[in-house]
Image: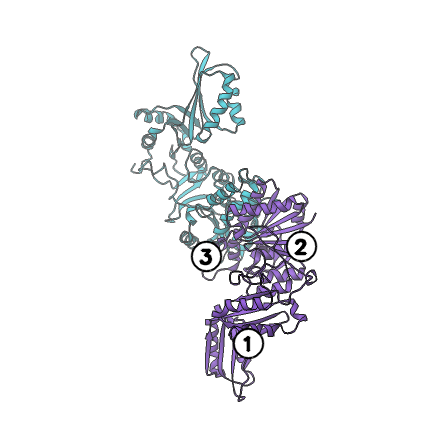
Chain colours: A purple, B cyan
Amino acid sequence: MSLIVQKFGGTSVGGLDRIARAARHVKRAADAGHRIVVVVSAMAGETDRLVALVRAAGADYDSREHDAVVASGEQVTAGLMALRLQSMGLPARSFQGWQVPIVTDRGHGRARVLDVEPGNLAAAIDDGAIPVVAGFQGVTGEGRVTTLGRGGSDLSAVVLASALGAERCDVFTDVEGVFTCDPRLVAKAHKLDKITYEEMLELSSQGAKVLHTRSVATAMNRRVRLQVLSTFTGAPGTLVVDEDEIVEQQVVSGIAYSRDDAKITMVGLPDRPGVAAGLFGPLAEADINVDMIVQNISPDGELTDLTFTVAKGDLDRALEALDVSNATLGARRIEPDPHVVKVSVIGVGMRGHTGVAGRMFEALAGKGINIQLISTSEIKISVLIAEDYLELALRALHTAYGLDADD
Amino acid sequence: MSLIVQKFGGTSVGGLDRIARAARHVKRAADAGHRIVVVVSAMAGETDRLVALVRAAGADYDSREHDAVVASGEQVTAGLMALRLQSMGLPARSFQGWQVPIVTDRGHGRARVLDVEPGNLAAAIDDGAIPVVAGFQGVTGEGRVTTLGRGGSDLSAVVLASALGAERCDVFTDVEGVFTCDPRLVAKAHKLDKITYEEMLELSSQGAKVLHTRSVATAMNRRVRLQVLSTFTGAPGTLVVDEDEIVEQQVVSGIAYSRDDAKITMVGLPDRPGVAAGLFGPLAEADINVDMIVQNISPDGELTDLTFTVAKGDLDRALEALDVSNATLGARRIEPDPHVVKVSVIGVGMRGHTGVAGRMFEALAGKGINIQLISTSEIKISVLIAEDYLELALRALHTAYGLDADD
């Protein structure tokens, strides 16, 4: 009998009726002869409620106590799911992170999983039970509760699937799978049956919300087959797998976008050695991540324009840091622009094809969309454009790369 | 430095403002040079919310999962209290039952404490920290979470105080202490400065709500000095201590009452050997507790009336069981009466005094109150009367035993 890990996110367990629906997915898989390990998030909204309590209790809160409080959300759902499964005749029992144990480092609030000891779960499975594990949480070697940070429950599911040698890790969510593009913006977007780990990783890090980057990276490193599927339909979703499992590879598999970036241009910056260090060093010290960077050729060899992006949430802090640096750097002015979006086309097929970037620039030019910044990786091309053109750009690119559903 | 355990109940931590007020009591004691261990209940209403979720998840619920879910309430409060104390400059940290550990048997939902290992708490205290322990919860030897049942957080505080050799266990609550009688019904009732364990035990088991019987019994067995005091004022409350600590002992220390009893009379019961067994055996099998019992003398040696009380909540089930039994027993009829109350006068001073019962009967007769049943113990006399006379009886007895505040 094969083992499957089934993970249900916050909206999939956001109330007793939804827990009951999720339990039916478990039962269906159990009835089909699979052994199952269930991983659950907190009910939708519960983690936010608990975090708000923590913040109100003390401004500079101790992240260890934050974790002790916030982890209670998953504990409740795990117990309720176990009870629901029991009421359907399935011998389920809940496990908290420390009961597995899922051992993490002491990085409270965003702990890293060091070890999953599979013995207790394996014993429960051998007894015919269905373990229901509280996601998002672990325990340090010293016995203190940790949480794994954003996307933590997905990560719990992946590390458990790896430790137990599961055939697959099913991530039940509120969408049908991974789409070629956001279907709310591109009507012709369609669900992908399969996608590679690397593409999924790029899609996640370039703005697709369906899976968190850490979970995908961990699944890739540990070769855990992931499936993203809908908790509402239970129909086959998207498999995230190794490249060699995908027979016919598109050049571009998907298009992601992000509204989370802001652009900063240093206008009239003296072009001399050490300028970049004087600019980006203080930003790094302020823990501000810089993503895309482009420096114009300085026509007279003296003054240049330097443009880059930071997270929109960091913009104010970045401008403060730059104001300080610029006393020495001497740019004529600093121009912030939060009204930009980043659009990325992604596909492992790019490796063997030429002209992929060209087709992108052509498609955007055809719609009169100006490209402000470009960055590329082996399987990704990202461009920064004015935010008003987002939908237009996505649709043009979706068509240009032959992704439209009716093609 | 002496160690004090401070326990805060649900209303004392029912919101962040109340947690802040409770934290000020902790700080005051810490500033006075005491080492402190804090024990907290779940926020008022939270346990009920969680229990309702459990019940809705499955009718015949697994008490192990019930405990996993319900224990989360105290976990949240413990974390929030630790954070609040930290924000006041006190180095606090939370402990869940399994982190102490408070080891219990497997009687989920009403687990019995087997052992408290004080090492982890002692180490934290030696480090200068204030441990904030989630009350109401423990862990089995197999590592499953248990809850201790009603009054569980008080019990946690008492067993911790005992294991740590605390000088005192302060139970902060929404009343100023233990009163001679319920001040809502008897305006002249006054707070007692001290009361013996035995009296407190009788008061609790005869209806006083301020402390749960189990906690008092455990405190008595382990000789833990308890103080009941108000979380709103923090003023000295009532000390529950050994008899030899109390210099001047009243004959009667307090008067309790209970509305939780119902009376059943078996009218015209054939008076032959085996009747009592045939009556009370089936009730015991149905897990129905019988409290007061009186059998009339049968004038002709053939038929008798037998009257007894059961918990009001058990009345319907008791009548069903009696209907079955009576097919054999042959009482003429069964007369239930839920409109009764039990009034108890309690005092260790009764041991050395005569005429205590006589004064009770006189006082009640003086107000024309009929006594339906009587039961006594070494330090208690209880009578069952019609519920309409409750306030009148309490006030008459309060005066008769010299308890009125202006005496």
Rate crowding at label 2 as few (under 14), some (14 to 19) or many (20 or more) other CA atoms within 10 Å.
some
The mark nearer the N terminus, 3 or 2, is: 3
Q: Of the residues shown, which amino acid type is indicated by label 3?
A: Ala
Residue assigned mark 3: A52
Rate crowding at label 1 as few (under 14), some (14 to 19) or many (20 or more) other CA atoms within 10 Å.
some
* Vertical comparison of A378 with B263: above or below: below
Q: Of the residues shown, which amino acid type is indicated by label 2?
A: Ala
> x%, y% of residue A221?
66, 62
* Vertical comparison of A391 with B313: above or below: below
- B21 left or right of B138? left
Pick the front one: B22 or B245: B22
Tag shown at residue A59: none
Q: Of the residues shown, which amino acid type is indicated by label 1?
A: Ile
Instruction: Give the residue displayed 46% in from the left and 27% down from the top.
Output: B316
Residue A288 in view in this figure: yes
Rate crowding at label 3 as few (under 14), some (14 to 19) or many (20 or more) other CA atoms within 10 Å.
few
> Element under label 1?
strand
Instruction: Give the residue displayed 66% in from the left and 51% down from the top.
Output: A118
Residue assigned mark 1: A293
**Discs 2, 1: same chain:** yes
> x%, y% of residue B114?
57, 41
Read off the chain for label 3.
A
- Label 1 vs label 3: CA separation? 36 Å
Residue B115 in view in this figure: no
Residue assigned mark 2: A163
